[in-house]
Image (cartoon, coloured by chain):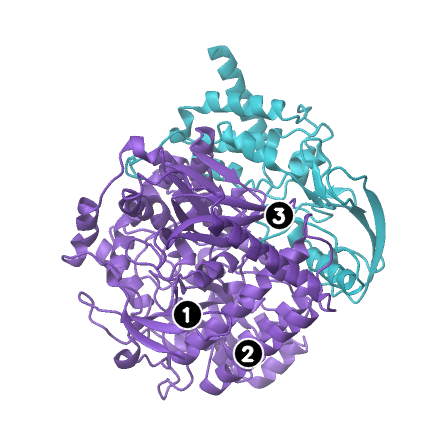
Chain colours: A cyan, B purple
Amino acid sequence: MKFTLKIWRQKNAKAKGRFETYQVEGISPDTSFLEMLDILNEKLVREGKEPVAFDHDCREGICGMCSLYVNGRAHGPDDDVTTCQLHCRKFHDGDTITIEPWRSAAFPVIKDLVVNRGAFDQILQAGGFINIGGIVPDANAIPISKVDADESMDAAACIGCGACVATCKNGSAMLFVAARVSSLAKLPQGRVEAARRAKAMVAKMDELGFGACSNTQACEAECPKGVSIAHIARLNREFLLAKVQD
Amino acid sequence: MADIETKLNSGIPEGPLAEKWTNYKSHVRVVNPNNKRKLDIIVVGTGLAGASAAATLGELGYNVKVFCISDSPRRAHSIAAQGGINAAKNYQNDNDSVYRLFYDTIKGGDYRAREANVYRLAEVSNLIIDKCVAQGVPFAREYGGLLANRSFGGAQVSRTFYARGQTGQQLLLGAYASLNRQIAAGKVKSYVRREMLDLVVIDGKARGIICRNLVTGEIERYGAHAVVLATGGYGNTYFLSTNAMNCNCSAALQCYRKGAYFANPCFVQIHPTCIPVHGEQQSKLTLMSESLRNDGRIWVPKKLEDVEKLRKKQIKPSQIPEEDRDYYLERRYPAFGNLVPRDVASRAAKERCDAGYGVNETGLAVFLDFAEPIKRLGRKVIEERYGNLFQMYEKITDVNPYEEPMQIFPAIHYTMGGIWVDYSLMTTIPGLYALGEANFSDHGGNRLGASALMQGLADGYYVLPYTIGDYLSHEILTPKIDTNHPAFKEAEDAVKAKIEKVFKVKGSQPVDALHKKLGNIMWEYVGMARNEAGLKKALGLIEEVRKEYETDVKVPGENNEFNQELEKAVRFGDFLDMAKLITLDALNRGESCGGHFREESQTEEGEAKRDDEHYMYVSAWEYRGEKEEPALHKEPLNYEEVKLSTRNYKD
């Protein structure tokens, strides 16, 4: 297969970026999208040019490191996958493909397609944990209904990639925050601090420059792990509860 | 090569096996809270071992600095572990026990692990599950609300706890949450996008590290009273593996060069259930969880003409009648069938493919079939058990595994070898500890499924926090480590020189092109089956690639910027040394054992033949300079509790 690639190039956080156009050919349809970029980079290096910087690691769709806005969609045209699991067979031979970094005020560009998602760590440091330590009770001491455990797991599937923020017109991190709040709130051990946690994490999200949620549901549509916006409703409940308790 | 028969002191405590850990804990020194506040610890790596260690040490009151190469501690490759974590809870009342978990691990490791370490691992396994549940890890549950278990990877009891096919992710998020809690409390400081490029040793003790800031290129110095290495394994030496792209062995190798012995490097695990290579453009391999073997049946056609038709796509695998299928694991190993340990399953797949029965165009694939279990249990049950894995398989291969069997082939997955550590997890450099996959201590020649997560968390939550106190209790009078000490400058200069050197070559080949060459050599000659001639050939070929690296590598850009090609170029120099070490060790170990199969040492039926008389030791390699060959030290293994037997999965 053969593609024309329009890729965002930006030397560093302060430099002005621009699109550059590249051609790749001889790509097998079974090649993954990132392998196609590897091939481009190998070619660029051989030609004495700067390769395109992009974040990636596990290439199994679980580490959350890869990002990329491909043809106007977070993680590209396929549903329920991260960019690393996107394959070239999802494109047509001869296609022009536009590749951009996550665009969000809270995720400044580091270089080319690489952004700084440190704000996500900071949100979780504000309360995305249960305050326990030391030696704890036996694992089977508290029965938890399978339904609750499953729902908690649905939310915990979030990989922290940032597609929700990148795809939201407001740059809101509500789905990311909701996934963690909801996952812990569904379990008895996380219930204890649920309201407090919701309040602290939302406050940190606001402080870091993420936008507000206006219920467009774009985040759910683009989440590679299918995390549901139902969790945002649960976050709102916990948040209100915290406000009432104040 | 020099062969030094020194006895490495493993520091195994006195007393009966089941009491050793308790005895040890009762007698080691502890540091009082006022003094803990004065002590600094560096933890490198934030996978299960590193994150759990950093969180626990912070919780105890030490000042911890934790480093990772990714943009967040949560990205570490532990996150990709799918299947589960073992513990000896015996919740299923199926006669599991600490002893049984210990015994299975020792046996599975083909009697090349230390009894005392493995027993301790089994002992603390139960605490891990308690801790994870308390952290909010959403393990699978039964309708009654209690935890669910499954049998995994050759175990005859159901002792594996799991969170769908994402157990590693959930456990890592648990450890990461604990870490975040300590970061919020100010006890841990997190440094992301930092790569450790050297260890600083002062007066024989580990006192700090040199890092490259991967965003700015700055070379940074960090000092501490102790350094903990939790940087994973060296599987990416082979280029294609199931490891994440950024997994590398540079930090470990640098410690080796500074005096830490490297143990059992030839023990590399090749996982039987990976998605086969699709072609030259491949960058990495994807693992399909071993749990699939609980229900899936592995086969190849009995007739070569069916193989031909499959390759030409004239027939679909489902059209081959039952009587023309060779379920070779069930045939060869009736007692364990499709659940034989990983090394056995991998070699059996290689044997069939070598004989010409490989089922895809490359001839390097076998089938993993779910038709029978879907018929027996219904699609819904299979979907519930493996849904996300089936989806992943379909996304990658474009084949629906509910309708046609999956194709699988073995791939490099995990490395049992690693930095040599004593019972307290301290390396041969005082004050330097190694945890998780980065050390060698618990899996012997072969790791059992669902045991990597267990070991990483055992080391980080329950072993190191006790053992490091014993060392640090002697350090309470040592002031903060001054990073202006000449040893820091010397290490920093060496790192800078190394970086300058790769830029200076200005050759024509990108690093990946060289790495692929190295990977091909390693897979061909130091892969699933090894022999003396091949290993000797590999040593020569590795040196040829090294020459190309030193004269023809091309690294674009500059140091003082985000530069991924530079990162790879620096790491590649270490992969070359690692490749040599693996090969030397494989050459030295003339027996077949665990993941290491020497063709010279096999039975008439082609099964691995262990040689306890000559090789019942840990090989620990000492670095002796760039131009010198490393020296081999041997730590004899003494089995007091377990009677050695030949692994038999036939009956």
Q: Give percent across and percent down for residue B221.
A: 52, 45
Residue on which the image places disc 2 = B524
Q: Nearer the viewer, residue B516 or B96?
A: B516
CA distance separating discs 2 and 1: 16 Å
Q: Nearer the viewer, residue A144 or B458?
A: B458
Tell me the SS state at disc 1. loop
Mark 3 nearby-residue class (10 Å; few <14, some 14–19, many ≥20)? many
Residue on which the image places disc 1 = B267
Tell me what residue is drawn at x 52 percent, y 20 percent: A199
Identify the chain of the residue marked 1, using the numbered disc in the image. B
Q: Amino acid at mark 2?
A: Glu
Same chain assignment for discs 1 and 3: yes
B498 in relation to B230, above or below: below
Please say whether residue B165 is visible from this viewpoint: no
Tell me what residue is drawn at x 74 percent, y 59 percent: A41
CA distance separating discs 3 and 2: 34 Å
Q: Give percent across and percent down for residue B153.
A: 39, 62
